[in-house]
Amino acid sequence: MGGASIQAEIAMSWSELERLVEDAETDAVMRRALRHCRSRRELLLAAGRLGYVISKADLQQAWMLQRHAPAPASLREAS
């Protein structure tokens, strides 16, 4: 039973990260504020002040996914 609640918390904070990204993509003021973050810790604190519940693990997972994602077609064609 404890494992299920941990999995739910992980999924919930990941969805919060997705929501933060979507909101930042559509809100220029929010985007500018987040660009001033110079570390993961600053980003987590800023997100928390904005009402998002995101974990350090979420940022690590997003970074890993981004590193291993294939380049967009537009960049592959330019080579």
Image: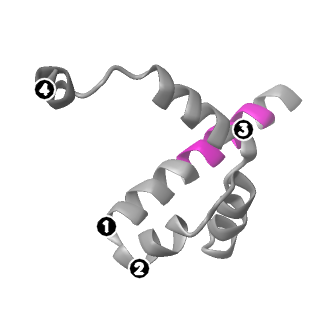
Q: Nearer the viewer, mark 1 or mark 2?
A: 2
Where is mark 2, residue-wise? 29
Q: Is residue 64 visible?
A: yes
Find disc 4 in the rendering and name its residue: 78
Amino acid type at mark 4: Ala
Which residue, given by chain and number where applicable, does mark 3 sit on?
Answer: 57
Mark 3 vs mark 4, foreground winner is 4
Q: CA distance from mark 1 to mark 4?
A: 27 Å
Mark 1 and mark 2: span between their CA atoms?
A: 9 Å
Q: Earlier in the sequence, mark 2 or mark 4?
A: 2
Magenta residue span: 6-15
Give yes or no for residue 9 being in the magenta stretch: yes
Name which residue type carries label 2. Val
Mark 1 belongs to which amino acid?
Thr
**Residue occupying the far bottom of the picture:** 29
> Residue 40: x and y, percent?
69, 52
Assess disc 4: are there few (<14), some (14-19) or many (≥20) residues with their C-alpha within 10 Å of its C-alpha.
few
Q: Residues within 10 Å of mark 1 (few under 14, many from 20)?
A: few
Dot 1 or dot 4, earlier in sequence: 1
* Left or right of 77 on screen, residue 33: right
> Tag 4, which secondary structure?
helix
The image position of residue 20, as x and y in percent, is 50, 59
